Image: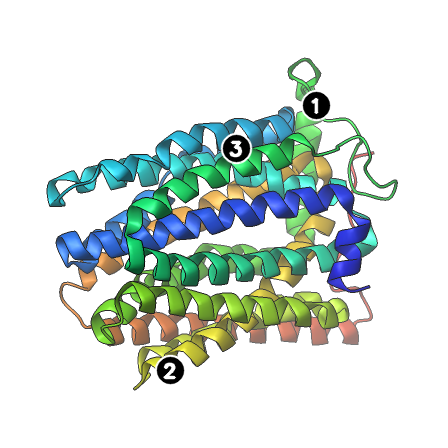
Amino acid sequence: MNSLQVLRQERSYRRLFAAGLVNGIGDRFSQVAVLGLLLSLTGSGLAIGITFAVRLFPYFVFGPLGGLLADRFSKKTIMLITDAVRLFFALTPLLVRDSGDVWIIYVSAFALSAGEAIYAPSRMSLIPRLVHRKNLLTVNSLEQAMVGFVLIGGSVTGGILAAAVGGQVSFVLNALSFLVSGVLLLRLDLAGRPADAEGTAVELTPTQTPSPARALRQTSVLRQLITQSFFLQIMLIVFAVWPIGDGIFNVLISVYAAEVFHMGDIGIGLLYGALGAGMLIGSGLAGKMARHMRTAAVLALGLEGIFQVLSSQSPSFLLLVLLLAVSAVITSVGNACNETVLMQLIPDEWRGRFFGGLTTLQNTVMGVAMLVSGFLLEAVTPRTLGLAGGTFLALLGFALSLTWLLHRVKAVRSQTPAEPSRITLD
């Protein structure tokens, strides 16, 4: 079944998809404008590194909180509240006038990120409860396609918009995106969920929180799952280390465009647009990996590292655009496969906390990497830093891939399954 058929069939997910799309495009409008504004006010890669770090540090506190709330309260209500709060902070960059006001950008970035850290676990853990199980890989491919649409529609258009009329319009559009997202979420029908969707039909209310005994049993089950699943052990290592390379790369995208190739806001938008195009292509290929999802998820890390190395040494802007697009294809396939396996492995009662903790781990590590990258750019060239980050990802990725493949061969020879069956709490 193709993606359009799934969108037509999964009515509730369609609204969630539309809300995420609108929300994401608005955020990209704002991000491109913020990056251009920072470079124009400070001319420093350090300011960009600090901004990205400030956006990611809130996940250290608010990520676990968001996961806990997602498992105990209405996910729809959590998403609506965070959209309403973020609408206000999306407008605060309008107050920036000179380099002395840069702190306002940092405050805005922190608040918006804190809201996303609470919002994301509810959205992620809600997906398996809205869609048919057979459609889960296709839906996660659509999630990658949404990222692609966001990068193209938000970053390219945002770059052109910021260059033509200034960033103020982008900040207003970002605020409006939260309003539109909230309207779409209000119409989300949680009662009409498919019969074969994951989890229970009724979300927990504050008076229905799990008993201490059941909470202890859930913890034991999750610990048992991690112990038995070699794939999950491998991916926990990936989740802890991959953000280092990605953090370096995210800082460098803007620097490559503005300082290496002197393309300004339009260059930033085009590079993010290339990533978006790659995500779209990858989302269409992910469905072909249904029988090899775990292997594809593990191999993606090393392949992305190679393309980051090549990107760092690109002699032309056009070639850089192409390399980023191919890198994004690999990332898109890997992410779709990875998220599908995790949604199938993790029990429904733990999904909010698991994805909240995962988001916390990834974004905290990435925040540190971005901050350090900003400082390093004061001492080394962007190309040198990109080469180092890409080499790190490639070496780690292929070491983990070799470990995984050897495990698979050993499992086949011993005629035992490489992964346990899904553990349930009932």
Quarter the N terminus occupies: bottom right
Write down the quadrant of residue 85 in the picture: top left
Residue at 26% x, 60% y: name it: 373
Q: Relative to residue 328, is residue 371 depicted above or below? A: above
Crowd rating for badge 3 (residues with CA inside 10 Å; few <14, some 14–19, many 20+): many
> Which of disc 2 and disc 3 is earlier in sequence?
3
| Residue at 60% across, 72% down | 281
Q: Position of residue 399 (x, y in %)?
A: 50, 73
Q: Which residue is mark 2?
A: 318
Give the residue at mark 3.
66
Residue 392, position in %: x, y?
38, 71
Under mark 3, the amino acid is: Gly
Q: Are marks 3 and 2 in contact (CB under 8 Å)?
A: no
Is there a contact, CB below 8 Å, between mark 2 and mark 1?
Answer: no
Quarter of the picture containing the C terminus is top right
From this view, report whether residue 43 is shown above or below residue 198: below
Q: Residue at x 74, y 64 (%)?
A: 418
Residue, disc 1: 204
